[in-house]
Image (spheres, rainbow, N blue to C red):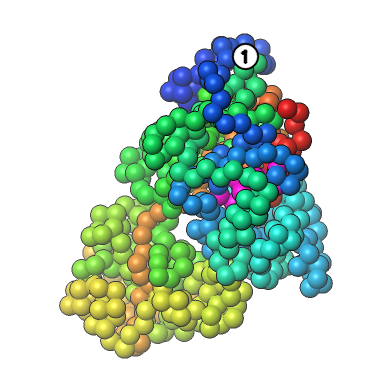
Amino acid sequence: MGSQGFSRRGLLKGALATGGAAATATVLGGCQQAPRSPNVPSKWDKEADVVVVGGGGTGCAAAMSAAEAGAKVILLEVAPALGGSSALCVGSVTAPLSKMQKDQGIQDSIEDYMEDILHATGANASRVDKDMLQLLAETSGPAIDWLAGLGVQFAGPYEYPGHHRVNRMHMLVPNSAAWRKVLQPKMQEMGVEILLQTKGAELYRDVNNRVLGVKAMDTTTNKAIAIKAKKAVILATASTEAATAYKKKITTPDIAEMPAANPNNDGSGLMMAAALGADLTMLDAWGSPGLRTNLPGPNVSSTGKQAWMPFGIMDAGAILVNNEGHRFVNEKGATDDIALAVQAQTGKICHMVFDSQVAEIFNKWPMVVSSHPDKGDVSGIGGWGLVDDFVARNGIKVAKTIEELAAAVKVEPAGLKATIEQWNNYCQEGKDPDFKRTTFGHAEAKTVGAGIKTPPFYVHSPIRVQIILADVTLMVNTKLQVLDVFGNVIKGLYAGGETGHGNLYLSGHGTHMAWSFASGRLAGTNAAAEES
């Protein structure tokens, strides 16, 4: 993901121009913002001590912790319900030093966690802000304890081979949306005013660039609401997965227009802050096209492989077909090419087909299909799912014949049967004249040349393209205060989650969720401590 030669200050300059902010006088001179005209409404419609923009895991944690600290809080969420991306994922929260770890006698440390995250980050490890990483390591375990104390249920912690040396993967039970059902009534009990279908549009500020509040828009009436924040505003609006115009500056238009896993992650919070001179970083992490399975099975990526596995299902010999039952791409080609090919198919979906020889391999730990909510229904493995676990959730379907398999996912039976017969011939010949695939099974799987011949047959379906895990973010300090392009604090403005993590690379399953809850909790506490 990402592109070369893209300047964050260039982006800021463009954002300032489009956002209407008069803050360009500082580009060459001095190290602080020049005085500017204040942006204050003629009257305030609402006021609170702390205004939180974004009602996902970060925003709800921020609102709850600020309310616990005695602040009056208003929480804005553009969707009809709270949850955001934190209610759409698998539900793993990977963190050290939780009470659950300690109760199970798991020996862990801040230093070991940091070392494991840096190792998982790979080539980007040298870019990681170690202070922010230490903040994650120190606060994410206590954040799990805090959520558990409020009534949120976790299972685990479970094993995460290849990334973490001890069990750290805590799973929300029964799924990732479980926290929302606990926090929403708790927030309401604490007096948090929740405004749904209400979008943050602009930040109000004084002549010294101190944030005074938020211009919000009721999306049902298109009416503006001026909300005063007597202490601070917290931005928790995720990142740029759905920011099509922004992405077109970085990648090709056809990729930029691919759908986001969460269509509300449009970068608006980043632009609100940029209009005040906030610094943006990790601009190459705009998100990436992923092939994700959708309902009825869990929303996961099953076409790749986990870090510890020598090969994945596709490597072992699975193929992708469209609704007509035809292959349409080199399944081992570049991710962008596969994603573009899927987008060109009927219904913009595809189906991953394999046979029992491959299924048997991925029904034995540590070979897994993907991460999985809670425990596997059949295997009982925490956090990871085998083939039979996904069959139990109706995400993978199984049939004795190719025709029955096609009928199960509404694929043209004759087309699928002809495609598999042709694929089996290609596997025997070791050549793919249609799409130039060069692998026909995997040596370690003992499937080279095997094709798709052994019943029963399996299909993981439907699979769609989604832009996921963008990390374009605001520069923040360890108090979660937003910084301008010169490293100065923008007073009265905090950010967390994907919106605010500076140069912290959130590598591996569950690390984004750990930062979401930990940073939201910390931002809320710190914002509530501001002077009115």
Residue lying at the far left in this picture: please name it.
Answer: 414
Instruction: Say if 200 sits above or below 453 in the image.
Output: above
**Secondary structure, magenta segment, majority class:** helix
Name the residue at 62% across, 66% down: 171
Counting from the top left corner in percent of width and height, residue 4 is at 47, 36
Q: Is residue 403 left or right of residue 118?
A: left
Disc 1 on helix, strand or loop? loop
Residue 193 found in image quarter: top right
410 or 74, which lies in front?
74
Instruction: Say if 258 sits above or below 492 in the image.
Output: below
Q: Which residues are magenta?
A: 56-66
Q: Is residue 189 left or right of residue 54?
A: right
Q: Is residue 121 left or right of residue 104?
A: left
Q: Is residue 9 left or right of residue 302?
A: right
Name the residue at 68% across, 49% down: 190
159 or 366, which lies in front?
159
**Residue 418 in sight from this viewpoint:** no
Q: Which residue is mark 1?
A: 207
Counting from the top left corner in percent of width and height, residue 141 is at 74, 57
Residue 236 found in image quarter: top right
Residue count near mark 1 (Cα–Cα under 10 Å), binned few <14, some 14–19, many ≥20? few
Q: How many marks?
A: 1
Counting from the top left corner in percent of width and height, residue 119 is at 67, 55
Q: Amino acid at mark 1?
A: Val
Counting from the top left corner in percent of width and height, residue 247 is at 41, 38
Name the residue at 73% across, 27% down: 532
Name the residue at 62% across, 11% down: 35
**Residue 183 in sight from this viewpoint:** yes
Q: Is residue 328 magenta?
A: no
